[in-house]
Image (tube, rainbow, N blue to C red):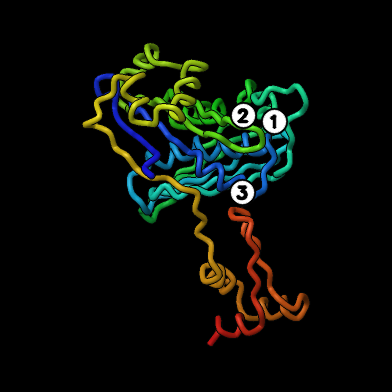
Amino acid sequence: MKNVLRTLIGGGQVSLTLIDGTEIVREAIRLHVLSRASAIALGKTLLDMTFISASLKEEKHSVSVSVRGNGEGGEISVSGNGRLEMRGYIGDTSVPVLPGEREEEAETRCLGAEGSVTVIRDDGYGGLPFVGSCLLPASGGVDAAFEEYYRISEQLPTRIASVLHFEGDELAFAGCAALQPLPDADKSLLDFLPKGEELRKIAAEIGRLGTEKCAKEYFSADSAAFALREAAYKCNCSKEYLSGVLLSLGREELEDILRTEGEIRVHCHYCNKDYRFTAEDVKKMFP
């Protein structure tokens, strides 16, 4: 399903991105067995990073974020690439929503009010990747953190609104709406476009209307200029890939682990999967 729409509005000076990330967040919840508050914090980070990944120029380009706050959720890490393959994890998967607590309050408690956001973008040209960072804003919240990152590190005033809706214990919808002026655009254009709660309501409407109808109804966007793509939760780990990683440790160190542990165990945080390597596996690495 093509669940990411990108187009230009405001006379071609503002980029609009609308995302239906329901299946992305559902897969994260399934893989990590997330509680409600942990799902909100990681889910919103996945949605906002899908927006950033959609802006990468080529499929081989990649971007990752580390959100280190003093909240109950611990570190949040999410990676994406130009193919819109997303993956992520959160330090504590079991942070609950407290009785009577609004979901926004649970999100802030999970994330924390102090900490940092670090984004690493690799454009695949062989040089050093771009690294940008900022402090978590005092207002808290994932969207505010990414807006602060863009303001500080890339000097691009950006509006991002992500929403998660639950029905009982099940995720019903997860979506994101983002507005960003092009680098040479008149930044004041954002003054006339939705922000805050208004933009969050539009993000929620994606669940009812879909990305294309939402872009037309709320932004008078021209469907002829729509770029539609598919984003999904997909981890790139495999036993073959991890064999290459282990190979870099050298035969002596791997055999030492085998003597001590009996096998080599590798855990992928992104897909919550364990890989085991036996003496025979190591032997095959060094023919």
The residue nearer to you, when weighing 5 against 131, is: 5
Calculate the distance from the C-alpha at mark 1 to the C-alpha at mark 2: 8 Å
Within 10 angstroms of label 1, few (less than 14), some, or many (20 or more) residues?
Answer: many
Q: Can you say whether 44 is above or below 59 in the image?
A: above
SS of the residue at dot 1?
loop
Residue 30: numbered disc: 3
- Residue 237 visible at all: yes
Q: CA distance from mark 3 to mark 1?
A: 24 Å
Residue at label 2? 136
Along the line of sight, which residue is nearer the eye, 52 or 200? 200
Q: Residue at x 45, y 44 (%)?
A: 130
The quadrant of the rendering that contains the N terminus is: top left
The residue located at (78%, 25%) in the rendering is 99
On screen, residue 269 versus residue 96, left or right, reads left
In the rendered image, which residue does mark 1 sit on?
A: 112
Q: Residue flagged by tag 3: what amino acid is it?
A: Arg
CB under 8 Å between discs 3 and 1: no
Q: Position of residue 132 (x, y in %)?
A: 50, 38
| Type of amino acid at the residue the image marks with label 2 | Leu
Comparing marks 3 and 1, which lies closer to the viewer?
3
